[in-house]
Image (spheres, rainbow, N blue to C red):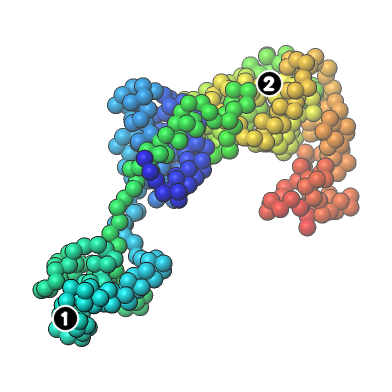
Amino acid sequence: MHCKPNTVKHYGLMLKKHIVPRLGWLRVSEVKKKHILKFQFGLSDIPTVANRTVDILVKMFNMAGSWEMRPPGRNPCRSIRRYKVEPHKERFLTPKELARLGHTLDIAPEKRLAARRQQGGSAHRPDATGSGGSARGTATRSRQFVGVPWPEEGHPSDQHQRLLEPHPQARRPGGRDRSSVFRAITVSRAAAAYILAAVAALALFGTGLAETWRGLIVAPEHRCSPYDRNQDYHYPQSIEREIVHRLGAVYGPYTGTCFSSTSETDIEHMVATSEAHDSGLCATDRATRARFATDLRNLTLASPGVNRHRKSGKDAGEWLPERNRCWFAARIVEVRRAYGLTIDQREAQALERVLAGCTGTAMEPMVCHTSTGRDSGRGLGAGSAADGNGDALAHYDDNRNGRITCKEARRHGIAPVRRDHPAYRYMRDGDGDGIVCE
């Protein structure tokens, strides 16, 4: 089926930019109406695109049913209401079309005179100001452009009269003068474009050709529904006892630190809840999110300095622990697989670098270094961490709260602090320009 190159390009971009990043992590047979509704909601700020992508998905899942990739008649896009934003399709002539029209209007009288001379008829040139001359002259010209037969005698038909009327906006006060512009009758090619896009979409993710890494779909993070940690990712404090039981002590595996009690630790999600939400849980129900929040495979202990400031909601592409990196990386992959989460390119590369050098993924034997009570997550190796940045807190965090302020940076003479400085990761870059304390 033929489509214009621009149409092919436009729908290809819609697939690559909107459909695959938001729905590519699901199998065709797994897509439900709730996924389509959240997909549509995610595009509510661009409703025209939302409508067109839903139309693409309608055709795509119809084809999936005919190809027995889904039960027939189970189209998840059925009865999805579109945003009422698109007006009646109408366009005006482009400058090139107007130039062609003007050329046709210029040469039409001469051609007609030449034809009459060859037929032996009158060579009188129609007078544009004579009775009926204006209508017939314009009609002759419009016939050259729109290809509609025009009666040689009499007045224009209703069809031609509508073609010759100026656009209503030309009569509005202050509007652009469009009195010489003819309405162009357009034929929608949407059906052909949708079929083309449907085939492309199925090729991209319906048949499993999306880019993957260790069984995970590689895709950018996308928040398809609002994130509410307290409502959707709540967990009871009592789960801390189960975490301690699994660890064998009140122990922080990120730093190899033993604590005297759980009052010195936080419950830590290895895959942060906000990260998981943006990697696919935003399209799941609350029960799935609650199960993720209490999944012991994803829970450990960490000091407040590590949990709240150093790691916080970062993924493995932004932060790695000082110790037990192989265990940490393997657990991230396991949890993401269990919940069908996607992974972005940077995190996949960071984890691959870790796992490529691992001989095993078990947690290292526990060698406790007792917390001092104001521990910021340094433990063993603090001051000489494997990533070369672990000594920044020891050097610049004067009040030992796990953060470095501009006041502390200036006191130590390191301001302004740039992104490549070891202290930068423990500071707040409000404008995200890579420079703190400017």
Q: Is residue 64 above or below residue 432?
A: above
- Taking the image as shown, residue 255 lies to the left or right of residue 5, namely right
Please identify, in this view, whether the residue under mark 2 or under mark 1 is nearer the observer.
1
Q: Nearer the viewer, residue 314 or 257?
A: 314
The image quadrant where one finds the N terminus is top left
Q: Earlier in the sequence, mark 2 or mark 1?
A: 1
Q: Secondary structure at mark 1?
A: loop
Q: Measured along the vertical axis of the image, is residue 191 above or below residue 437?
A: above
Q: Quadrant of residue 367?
A: top right
Q: Residue at the spot x=47%, y=31% of the render?
A: 203
Q: Image point 34% across, 22% down: which residue?
A: 71
Residue, x 79% and y 25% (percent of image)?
323
Measured from the top left, where is residue 322 in percent x and y? Answer: 79, 28
Which numbered marker is on residue 330? 2
Q: Is residue 286 visible?
A: no
Q: Tell me where residue 357 appears, x and y as whole percent.
A: 78, 22
Q: CB atoms at circles 2 and 1 under 8 Å apart?
A: no
